[in-house]
Amino acid sequence: MMLRESQIMKVHYVTAIAALFVVSVHIIMRVIMPFTMSLTYENVVANYHNIPYAILLELILVLIAIHGFNGLRIILLEYRQGKTWDGIVNIFSIIAMMAVITYGTRTIIVANGLGFG
Amino acid sequence: MKASKRTSISDNRYIDRDNREGVKGWLNPFKYSWERVSYWLQRLTGVFLLVYFIGHVFETSSLAVGEDAWNAMLQLTQTIWGHLFLILVIGTSTFHSANGIRLIFTENANGLGKAGRPDYPYNPLSLNYRQKSGIWVALILAAIAMLYGTRVLFGAE
Amino acid sequence: MNGLIQRIGIIKKKGIQKNKWRKNSEIIRNKILVKVLRANRIRGDSVHYDTFDIPVQRWSTVLDALLYAKSYLDSSIGIRYSCRMASCGSCGMKINGIPRLACYTKISELEGNTIVCEPLSNFPHIRDLVTDFTQFFEHHKDMKPYIQNENALTSDIKLSEYKQLPEDVDKYLQFSYCIKCGLCYSACPSVGTDTKFPGPQALAQAYRYFADSRDTATKERLDTVDNRHGIWRCHFAGSCSVVCPKGVDPALGIQLLKRHLMSNSKNQKRIAELQDRSKS
């Protein structure tokens, strides 16, 4: 099922606005305590153990991956034209999106499963 | 401009690339208006942030390996250059977000005025100060965010 | 000797806003150097520049200077021009790097002692200052730039009447002022790389007919521009509106059409049609 370009752009705008909110929360979490302290292993893992925060991270991953790779797709489509190139760019964008989301989700799941003991 | 072979337009009307500005046209924003500068910066910051995002996902995956891997990653990134890079990321993401919000409004024709009867000197209605000031606000917010980031990152040491 | 006589400040007339290209001062000269790009692409010539020393007067335009060069210095200069009054759009070229109409650009409003004249970018180059507008016109034709009305009484043309209020005319009038000069197409960064992108002129004309209350081909017009290399390859760089000599403001037309595509229009008839379209 091929989306119309106007539908893709709606997704692009919605992911942008949603990402703005979730990324802001992510950044705030890093500055509510001294920055260096917030990056210690224990504090970071504690964040991942917090289920709502883990869901937030997953949301960031999905939203930014979609928005970013769609943007790259647009740049590449404008750079060069042709049926083959258009097909390659569309497929590459989707694969890259899925690859980054999968890799990031793996980190979230594994980190969430880690304990202190 | 290189001399080019003769191409017949009727052969394939969409592949004649003679005399196109190419990527150079993207890269020279300063001879037109602020909106062109914003287009250039939005594109540049977007690509930069995408590269950073991929790197960040990869960098944080060291958490899944263990504490030693995580600390090794921190050794690599929590340096002066790492902090400077992060400040750049803060600035670019603030500009990209603020300008992006402006673009969401303007590409929905909000803040561009209504179509009417143009008169000399034919100043374009869409390039008004109401939406143009959004670019300046985005740049100012990015500068403020970078200053704050500097304070957080270098002040913590 | 640079031929500069004086720089005169013009009293700013009340009510006329400052335009980026209409400077508040004139540079009065009695002569100017005009550097013209020369090449015959059909013969495969390499590009070079010829410089001409041209006497000018206070109100001389770049076109006047080029025609003087053609008449008295080098008759082989290839140049298109016609009306000499910014009405036909024939004399579009890059003047000091910016797409402008030669007949509408006064020498006195240009800085520097040398004026560089080059053919419009993004158009296939033929010879000297002449470019090929075929692709540009093809993009325009793709937009079906004529009224399409399925309710028109074609059997008896005398009984077929389009009624339109002045308010309806105002919605599209400025976009109908387009003279197809190609300056916007030359200035657009997306056109510079995307050969399938119709360009600001064609998209503004798509909006001109979309917004016309006499036209009923809404769905077809939106379908024409809503594709991978259509209206969404415009990113509001605004250069098209900066260079337009007739106040068409193609950037405004394109964003207004985008608004309709995003189904955010207050126009109830259009909303109904768009809802219809989303079901198909």
Image (cartoon, rainbow, N blue to C red):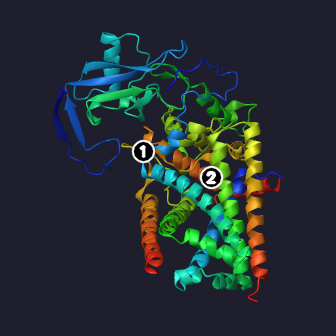
Q: Is residue B146 above or below residue C188?
A: below
Q: Is residue C101 left or right of residue A24?
A: left
Q: Is residue A116 left or right of residue B148?
A: right
Q: Is residue A13 left or right of residue A94?
A: left
Q: What residue did someone put label 2 on?
A: C258
Q: What residue did someone put label 1 on?
A: B32
- Distance of mark 1 from mark 2, alpha carbons? 23 Å
**Residue B78 in the image: x percent, y percent?**
54, 72
For residue B121, say whether it is visible: yes
In the rendered structure, find residue C191 and report the number of the disc placed on it: none
Q: Is residue B55 above or below residue C235?
A: below
**Residue A67 in the image: x percent, y percent?**
66, 60
* Both marks 1 and 2 on one chain: no
Name the amino acid, label 1. Tyr
Element class at badge 2: helix
Q: Residues within 10 Å of mark 2 (few under 14, many from 20)?
A: many
**Residue C4 in the image: x percent, y percent?**
18, 30
